[in-house]
Amino acid sequence: MKKLLAFLLVMMMAASMVTVSFAEDQENLVGNFNPEDTGSALQMLNQSFSTIGSVFTTVGETTRVAFVCPSWSDDVGSLTVTLWTWDKDYETTIAAAPVAGPTAFEDFEDNSVIGFEFETPLAAGTYYLQLSDAVDEKGSGVGVWSAQETYPGQAVLRDGEYVKKLSLRMYVDYVTEPEGNRYGELPKLEGPKNDLGCDDPLPFETYFKMADFDLSDVPAGDQVEFEQNEDGTLHVLVVEGAFDCKYDLNFYNFFDVDDEILCKDYPYVAIRLKLANIEDKAGAGEMFMYTSSVSGATGGYSTAIKYDWKNPDWQTVVADPTVVAQFKNNALDGDAWLGFRFDVLNGTPANDVEMDIDWIAFFGTEEAALAFDGDFTKAFPEKVTEVPVVTEAPTATDAPAVTDAPVVTDAPKPTDAPVVTEAATADPGKDNTEPKDNDVKSGLPGWALACIIGGAVVIVGAVIGIVAAAKKKKK
């Protein structure tokens, strides 16, 4: 692997040398101070926040602290890294002189480990490592690998505010590897009230129940297959080795509800599913939010879907877009849901991956989503759950038989009986199967299936179902 140019910062600090470094090789990009799966590339270019970083506590002397940062394959762009000793809160911390940096890393190789190496080890303690000043003239972006989950070894701050359920891919190298936890206790941090969600324990009145869909005409793709199980659930197969390909259950073009689903009130999306081959851990899925402000799949506007690969039974997974800064800001500004793109996997499976999906629904809180028992008929008793049936046009019946003229009695003297004309016969030149004007005509909206390869969307599916909409009784 080619050598990377490094920027050197020399500073006197307790007679130690601090070296800013790229890793010359990238043999281990998983990090060692973060959750196991940090597979979401968090974009920092042109986002609604300008800084992001981790508060962490070391339990021994360290020789390196760093993040793993993507540059979206083009090795272009810049990020600035700064390290402080943590002191009380964010404002107090960054007001002091940094331990190292700020240092800009320009045009770094994609997925580089960027941060600080210490010739004289850094003492154990609580620190704050921050990324800022994202620049990329090409516009493809720069950022940091992340996981949308809480990790006890670090607390993520975005523009100085603590963000729950977010962690960054990070390296902390010790002089002597600790025998127990690699991290120490974190300072107590309180996140801001996000003002999102509502108190309704039930899902929103519009939801997707797979048994309500007619999937008989779903085409099989090269890398994903759909079919309906006998119980009405949707069976999804993602084939082995589907490199950098994302799978879509795209409702955007067909999303039609009478009442707006406000992102502020119902920000959480829950999916009830069962994994068919739990011995294989294929990683997370991903959901791109389509809302009033962002109506297409957009980098930085997606959220992870975490599966429990150890669970052989039905499980409810909850997509939490509230950790995405732009979604939160747009939701508070009145955005409504327009739909979403559900990528079953956000990665390349080593083996075929199968799952069954029962339903997808919007909730006001994550707790409500996890507590919901899935009985939509009980939640919405006024909802008609049967799928509309498309009936054939009525067949023209034979003309009614002509009865004999009534018998005329003698008294009183009647006039001559009217002449009985022949009953009208069907005109053989006319289509007699045409329904009358008041016949009901039925139409079915549908889903679109898309395969995303190399960032481009290629529509490969067809109409496959209907969206079942339920209505809550208005108070």
Image (cartoon, grey):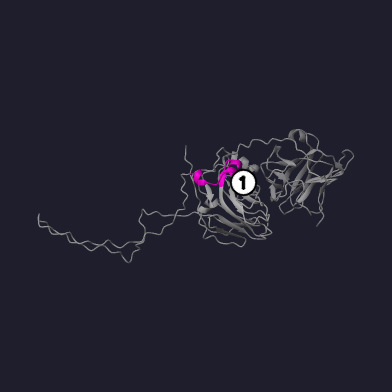
- The residue under the point 81% across, 56% down is 2
- Whether residue 321 sits left or right of residue 176 in the image: it is left
- Give the left or right position of residue 411, taking residue 197 as reference: left
Horizontal and vertical percent position of residue 396: 34, 61
Q: Quadrant of residue 99?
A: top right
Q: Looking at the image, can residue 116 be seen?
A: no
Q: Nearer the viewer, residue 432 or 28?
A: 28
- Position in image of residue 389 (x %, y %): 44, 55
Give the crowd class for mark 1: few <14, some 14-19, many >=20 residues within 10 Å.
many
Vertically, is 216 above or below 38?
Answer: below
Residue 26 placement, left or right of 424: right
Q: Is residue 105 visible?
A: yes
Q: Is residue 374 magenta?
A: yes
- 223 within the magenta span: no
Where residue 276 sits: x, y (%)?
A: 62, 56
Mark 1, residue position:
318
- Residue type beneath disc 1: Val
Between 452 and 471, the one lying in front of the other is 471
Q: Which residues are magenta?
A: 361-380
